[in-house]
Amino acid sequence: MVFPEFKKQLVVTVFLLTFLTGVFSCSAFAAEEFNRRTPLVLAVEKVGPAVVNIYTEEAAPELRNPFRNFGDNVFDRFFKDVFPPVNQKRRSLGSGVIINADGYILTNEHVIGKAVRIKVTLVGKQEYDGRLVGADRASDLAVIKIDPKEPLPFVEMGRSDDLMIGETVIAIGNPFGLQHTVTTGIISALNRSIKAGENTIYHDFIQVDSSINPGNSGGPLLNINGSLIGINTAIYQKAEGIGFAIPIDNAKRIINDLISYGKVRRGWLGVSVQDMTPELLQYFKLDRHRGVLVTRVFPGSPASRAGMKRGDVILKLDSHEISRKAEYQQRIGSYSVGNSIAFSVLREGREETIPLKVTRISKNQVAEFTRNWLGLAVQGISDAVVRRYGLQTRRGVVVAKVVPSGAGGRIGINPGDVIRQVNQNQVNNEEDFNKAILEAAGRDSALLLIQRGRHGYYVTLEP
């Protein structure tokens, strides 16, 4: 027989034990979940919603009339009849990262460079039409835009000048169409150079061992805090576990230009440089191969105004050591008009810092700059010019004078030659030529398409 008081106490005790067991179980589960929510998980949860999938449609390549640059396109009708355009489109995909709440997305230029249509899918499966805002092939970066009805989650820009070899990184993207795939690894190396094609070398990449596969291009590379430190760009096809990303500091310098102008406004500094030889390294008492030698400073240029001199050895740009001319050109190309650069130069045995601001060459300086830089003077093609030189075309600009010791004279350009293209810019008249020179002024060489009679040839001028 159980007394009523004892029975009551027993029920209360059982209830308390059951309640405490549940509390302890919930606490243990919460503690376990807390322990599993590592900084890596938090970083992915933080940034994941800002990563997008990019689908593009690319038009099939059109067979181009090889005679189009010369004469009046008399063969165009023949080529269109024999080789009609193909309407088939190819689909490709890549990744991107939202960089502000209004729907601006940072990605690679090669992801959208040939696109005739862009589709963007968010992590919640919402799909938007995307439009190209700006792209830059030299840096392989582009900005596209979608128009959301509500503000979007976006990623915080980090920095890449303090990265450490061995630190943990996270890559998010859409490899092989597998949406929102997360991989992790470490930074394997910094300032890597990789070759892309026959004559193109990209410098200053972050090398990582996290898996980066086709479809990851344009996606974010994050540090353990979830800050954006790079844009995943390339894989090393001959080995697994080697990927490359563009440092975010390089991207930050040109994003505003891409959004505001649709392209990067590359200015000029007015400096020509050359690689260091063993003899020069010995002369300047450098303990190893580093630096580039200033061979020319253009009068009235930003470099001239800042006090740069011929014979200076440029050792660093913004604390980044320089060892090759190609590396110098690549780094300079990542700065746009208005950016400031701190040059570390060796002069008379002492290292000095020279601050320079990138500026745009003015239109009234184009003729003088062309003469000083390329050793050429040009003019538009009028009826009198056609008769004087017996030209076969009215498109382009004609070379009126050649400085024998200049870059054009040394390579064999003659008066009467017609310039049809500067780098990738087609030249139909003086205005086109001036714009092309303004864009080329930030570089150390220029690729010209020269027409002589009915024949054309490419030449590279290196002042």
Image: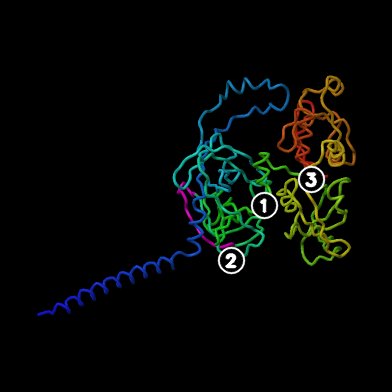
- Pick the residue in front: 228 or 58: 228
Residue 250 numbered tag = 1
Q: Residues within 10 Å of mark 2 (few under 14, many from 20)?
A: few
**Which of the two discs, 3 and 1, labels the residue nearer the N terminus?**
1
Based on the picture, tell me whether residue 176 belongs to the magenta stretch. yes
> Could you give the CA–CA distance between mark 2 and mark 1, rounded to whole angstroms?
21 Å
The answer to which quarter of the image holds residue 73 is top right
Marker count (numbered): 3
Q: Point out the stretch of residues depicted in magenta.
A: 174-187
Identify the secondary structure beneath mark 2: loop
The answer to which quarter of the image holds residue 316 is bottom right
User: Which residue does the numbered mark 3 point to in the structure image?
Assistant: 359
> Could you give the CA–CA distance between mark 2 and mark 3, rounded to whole angstroms?
38 Å
User: Which residue does the numbered mark 2 point to in the structure image?
Assistant: 166
Above or below 212: residue 4: below
Based on the picture, tell me whether residue 453 belongs to the magenta stretch. no
> Which amino acid, mark 3?
Thr
Residue at the (53%, 54%) spot, across then down: 212
Q: Nearer the viewer, mark 2 or mark 1?
A: 1
Q: Image quadrant for the N terminus?
A: bottom left
Above or below 414: residue 171: below
Q: Is residue 205 left or right of residue 320?
A: left
- The x and y percentages for residue 131 are 57, 37
